[in-house]
Amino acid sequence: MKPSDRLNKIPPYLFAEIDRKVDEARAKGVDIINLGIGDPDTPTLPHIVTEMHKAIDDPSTHNYPPYQGTADFRKACSEWMKNRFDVNLDPNSEVLALIGSKEAIAHVFIAFVDPGDYTLIPDPAYPVYKTATILAGGTPYLMPINPENNYLPDLDKIPEDVAKKAKLMFLNYPNNPTGAVANIEYFKKVVDFANKYDILICSDQAYSEMTYDGYVAPSFLQIEGAKDRCIEFFSHSKTYNMTGWRVGFAVGGKEAIKALGTIKNNIDSGVFKAIQNAAITALESPQLNIDDLNKMYQKRRDVLYNGLKELGWNIELPKATFYFWLPVPKGYTSVSFVGLLLEKAGIVVPPGNGYGSNGEGFFRIAITVGEEKIKEALQRMKDAGIRYE
Ligand SMILES: *Cc1c(COP(=O)(O)O)cnc(C)c1O
């Protein structure tokens, strides 16, 4: 029995070595502070859970759902998009329910990429974009993002022959792992580029609502005439503390939504209707609920920022996401530095190169633990003499 060749082409799991070291440290009784997890640490908002209790008792939610999402769910998504971005979407042809956004992010490659095609993928990035390209038989062209280009791919540096063979470009702002944001002017340049080379823009909006200091993240759909060029992936996971529920939605041009929907209805059978009902409640609940979560993250962010500053990290305050993307001190690689943090301070963080080779020299901190834990982590670094010089 031999697995497919495509499986062998998936790059090795770079966090495996870290996972092993963490297990080892735990076994030795080390009190680990895990700042590695991109998963909210507080529960799903209670009114959503209450709606779920109601929905699951209703037998009409128990059979197969419509594969594209219930009419009510798609309507709630289009209304949310209208309120949030002032964009008009046809709930019947421009909205699709997702089993969390990750499956759709992977499936869109199956829908658009043939062997020999290029995809344009940022480096570092959420690993799915690259692996899904490989699974589809395509070739990822990695666009470096770094402090010099403000973590925005430099479109002028994409070779003409690559652009001509590229089927799609993936972007993710607010960004995981860097916490970077993009403005609408940059998005407009991307739309011009995509129009020129006939490329589908795939916009991962997992962190669209997790923003601070009054910053509001834009949508590609706000750009006149861009809808047919793009598909955006929204997720309930981070916005409403619903990572385990597996629900989100895609919006965009009819053609892209239809192509993704065709792949999906040949692979999955939709989102449990009770979860869709609860997800509607989330979308229709006051923005205030999200503001409260953001206030909590913002306080943690400020604590971490100030502490890191004292330790020598001179960085910009992230405007969005729950991530800090930090350079490792001189003399270390990403992997050797996260090893040091674990050994000397019992702190777990992912190495930057786990998100792409261009992430070498960086590590990521997630503020998905309480303020006290963040303070303790900073104190441990201080005590261990870990500083950025
Ligand atoms: C968390 C995350 C997602 C997906 O989450 P789902 O739970 O599958 O909706 C997508 N993209 C990025 C960049 C993420 O960090």
Image (cartoon, rainbow, N blue to C red):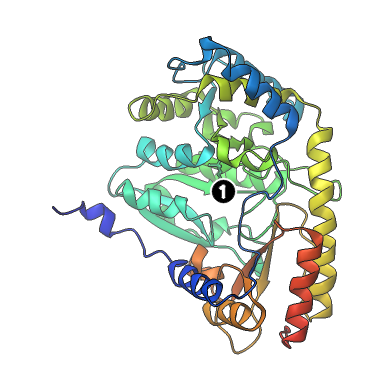
Residue 199 seen anywhere in this rendered image of the structure:
no
Q: Is mark 1 within 8 Å of ligand 1?
A: no
Q: Is residue 19 left or right of residue 153?
A: left
* Position of residue 263 measured from the top left corner of the image (x, y, whole percent): 36, 30
The reply to whether residue 348 is in sight is yes
Q: Is residue 306 above or below residue 110?
A: below
Q: Where in the image, quadrant-wise, is ligand 1 located?
A: top right
Relative to 99, residue 370 above or below: below
Instruction: From the viewer's perspective, tell me whether residue 239 is left or right of residue 57.
Output: right
Question: Left or right of 23: which side holds 371?
Answer: right
Residue at 54 percent of width and 76 percent of height: 25
Query: Which residue is outermost to the top?
Result: 60
Depth check: 131 or 123 in front?
Answer: 131
**Does 68 sit above or below residue 336?**
above
Q: Position of residue 325 (x, y in %)?
A: 66, 66
In what quadrant of the picture does the C terminus appear?
A: bottom right
Give amino acid for label 1.
Leu
Which residue sits at x=52%, y=15%? 61
Q: Quadrant of residue 328?
A: bottom right
- Percent coordinates x, y for residue 154 in the rendering: 58, 59
Residue at point 37%, 65% (across, down): 12
Judge the density around disc 1: few (<14), some (14-19), many (≥20) Cα neighbours within 10 Å. Answer: many
For label 1, the residue is 171
From the viewer's perspective, tell me whether residue 46 is left or right of residue 170. Answer: right
Out of 364 and 202, give the one closest to the viewer: 364
What secondary structure is marked by label 1? strand
Q: Find residue 29 and report its horizontal and vertical position in percent.
A: 58, 75
